[in-house]
Amino acid sequence: MVPSISDHPADVVVGSWPATARYDLDAAPGGLGLVQDLLNTISAGAPRQPDLLDELDSATEWAHLAVAQWSTATGRPAPDVTLDAAGLRALRIFREELSDEIDARLRITPDPGQPVGASNRVPTGSRTTGATLRLDRDGSVHLDPAGFGADLLVSLVLAALFEAQLADVGRRIKTCRNPRCRVAFYDRSRNNSGAWHSVRACGHPTNLRAHRARQRQAD
């Protein structure tokens, strides 16, 4: 049986994002933390952490904790998310799609003739979900996720990404360049140049392996 979050209480800080806390990382601001946390349900780290979406029990526990933290981070009521086996399979697929799209964005070599933010990459697919626009009494407009189960979680994640794009911070969600890792982090560097979730754990060893490989090739 795959261990659940509650099997490792020391790894999860109360009031924190449950998956991201396992990797001792600062969380992305606001609802964008949910995007990072979904990506960080993967099995990674040393010692290796379990994949929280491997089984329905651990996935349900993660979803309840993550939605509660999303409510705290955004100041919005926490929706009721109930996962079933089919929804869990869909959520795992969505997580991989999201990770692959972020990986591809980070590795694109832009065409010098294209405007900033444009890409010469053909999208591999698309993901649609429900949401509503709500007008408050003060005249502000809010994007409210909609749906049930896994669809609601996908809606929450995509809405958070959309709002982050409007604020020009969505591009700061990255996955570690170490292919053995792929932990998601929020790049707080001034020029958004971060490449590793941890320079000590992933950056230095990866650069050292590349340096030794170049030396062997030269010899």
Image (cartoon, rainbow, N blue to C red):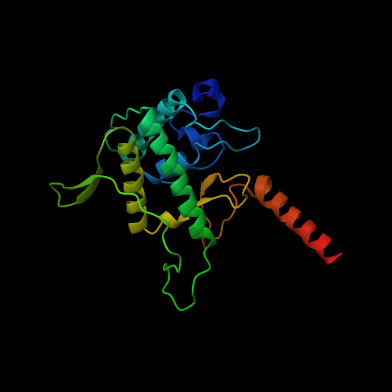
Q: Is residue 75 above or below residue 158?
A: above
Residue lying at the far right of the rendered structure = 219
Say whether residue 173 is visible.
no
Res 43 → quadrant: top right
Q: Residue at x 38, y 59 (%)?
A: 168
Could you say which is closer to the camera, residue 186 or residue 148? 148
Left or right of 204, for residue 13: left
Q: Residue at x 25, y 44 (%)?
A: 130
Residue lying at the far bottom of the rendered structure = 113
Q: Position of residue 147 (x, y in %)?
A: 25, 37
Say whether residue 166 is visible.
yes
**Image quarter hosting the N terminus:** top right
Q: Is residue 37 above or below residue 101?
A: above
Q: Residue at x 41, y 60 (%)?
A: 123
Q: Position of residue 34 (x, y in %)?
A: 40, 41
**Image quarter hosting the C terminus:** bottom right
Res 213 → quadrant: bottom right
Q: Position of residue 186 (x, y in %)?
A: 49, 49
Could you say which is closer to the camera, residue 89 or residue 34? 89
